[in-house]
Amino acid sequence: MKNLIVGCGISGAALARLLAESGETVTVIDSKNHIAGNIYDYYQDGICVHKYGTHIFHTNNKTVWDFVGRFCQWYPYQHQVRGLVDGQLIPIPFNLNSLYMVFPNELAIRIEKKLLDNFGFNVKVPILELRKKDDKDLQFLAQYIYEKIFLEYTLKQWGQKPDEIDPSVSGRVPVYIARDNRYFQDKYQGIPIGGYTQMVKKMLAHENITVKLNTGFKPSMKYDRLFWSGSIDEFFNYEYGELPYRSERFEFITFPYKKFQDVAVVNYPCNYDWTRIGEYKHFLRDESEKTIVSYEYPEPFEIGKNERYYPIANDKNAELYQKYLKLAANKPNVFFFGRLGDYKYYDMDKAIARCFEIMKNLGEK
């Protein structure tokens, strides 16, 4: 095989297409029995269900948006999330609308003014940064958000306290000084009409691409170049030990009524053992007399038991990953990429942008 890609998720499929369009022949293998990896979806009761939890495509990268748009028609979905806080479903991230929902009006007015005076409008401030301000009202707000939204959710999601994980993770949960209830503010946001699986299927539909499912990688396989989107520590047989990940368990329930909740995702920071509930018919406004939701339970990753989802970002794990990178440097015809290969959290657009970067590097060699 000229080019062998291990993994048929969004990273593997995008790279396969880019290689194929450059004139290269590509073989893509995946141990799963379906394409599209963790963005795989399917239809049930007329509803497009995401098998591995809710996925929303969003980006400011026009090159990536245009590339993916070649393989689907976009439904212009704008994602909103609610969180159950003190018995109310408030906008997440916590914003000025949330402020007036949970606090008395007089207190909310005073805090809003101080937020605007200190940070300005339409600004996202990490919760841990807000806690450092020398102002009683802002410290009160910071502590409230920290306890009601951030702390318990982080403990459930990551199994660690906020100060035990990298600031890049905690920075993803800001206070948004605005009245924009959307979860993302990217210029381009949407869900592929027909679903992600159909989008990936079209991406792989090229005469230079061969796809083999139910096929794991074997060291005896012959190739000129190997592109590995699996876990880098697995490739090296865990020579330095396992890189830690968080996994997820999804409990899908079909209810015999049209709607379960008002938005696609509701977070539960302090209540229950699940972190959030996703309701899938919101994404494409699927019409059905039933509705399908998923309860999401984070858990530690264990080999052979569940799937790797989120790399755990901290100094100790970064040091371990660097050891594997040094081993990778001795494999000039092997390229590691994707969330597992790079041991890095990627949104879908960043995973695709990484494939463009690989193609550029190959062209420079």
Image: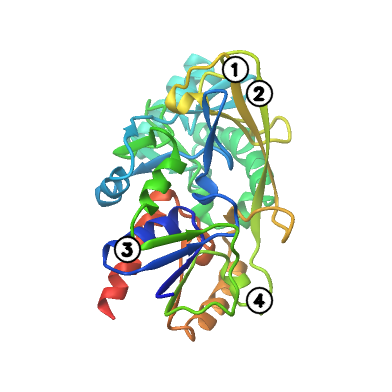
Report how far apart the C-alphas of labels 2 and 1 lie in the structure: 7 Å
Q: Which mark is residue 20?
A: 3
User: Which of the two labelled residues, at mark 2 and mark 4, occupies the earlier sequence position?
Assistant: 4
Callout 1: helix, strand or loop? Answer: loop
Disc 1: which residue: 290
Q: Is the C-beta separation of discs 2 and 1 under 8 Å?
A: yes
Q: Secondary structure at mark 2?
A: strand
The percent coordinates of residue 334 (x first, y second) are 46, 77
In the image, taking residue 320 as reference, residue 175 lies left or right, namely left
Q: Which mark is residue 254?
A: 2
**In front: label 3 or label 2:** 3
Question: How far apart are the two marked residues, 2 and 4, measured between alpha carbons?
Answer: 40 Å
Q: Amino acid at mark 4?
A: Asn
Q: Amino acid at mark 1?
A: Lys
* Image quadrant occupied by the N terminus: bottom left
| Sequence-earlier tag: 1 or 3 | 3
**Disc 2 versus disc 4: nearer the observer:** 2
Which numbered circle lies on residue 237? 4
